[in-house]
């Protein structure tokens, strides 16, 4: 049975996102069919030279397959 899992994070936490995805794969013993992602740039909301930037959003969509439950 094919299913979809969506992961969301920010680009300043990519290492944690990668660990979360790998943990999901191992824990659920899934067969990954495809992974795609999108990165949206951070929005500059401050003014002047001392403004701060927030991380951009990162979305990862995984298509995976699991065995159908036995009936």
Image: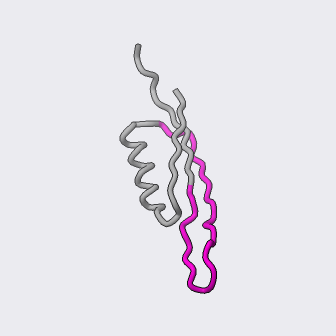
69 up-or-down from 51: above or below: above
Residue projecting furthest to the left: 27
Determine which quarter of the picture holds residue 30.
top left
Task: Indicate whether residue 47 is drawn in magenta.
Answer: yes
Split into 4 quadrants, where in the image is the C terminus?
Answer: top left
Which residue occupies the foreground of this view, 59 or 43?
43
Task: Indicate whether residue 27 is drawn in magenta.
Answer: no
Query: Viewed as shown, does residue 31 lie left or right of 39?
Result: left
Which residue occupies the foreground of this view, 39 or 64?
39
26 up-or-down from 15: above or below: above
Residue 43: image location, x then y, percent: 63, 68
Residue lying at 45% horizontally and 26% vertically, measured from the top left: 67
Residue lying at 36% horizontally and 40% vertically, measured from the top left: 27
Residue 62: image location, x then y, percent: 54, 43
Residue 54: image location, x then y, percent: 54, 69
Magenta stretch bounds: 31-58
Residue lying at 46% horizontally and 55% vertically, measured from the top left: 17
């Amino acid at each position: 049975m094919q299913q979809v899992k969506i992961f969301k994070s920010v680009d300043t936490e990519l290492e944690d996102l990668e660990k979360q995805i790998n943990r999901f794969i191992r824990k659920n013993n899934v067969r990954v069919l495809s992974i795609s992602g999108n990165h949206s740039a951070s929005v500059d909301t401050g003014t002047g030279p001392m403004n701060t930037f927030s991380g951009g959003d990162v979305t990862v969509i995984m298509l995976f397959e699991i065995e159908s439950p036995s009936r």
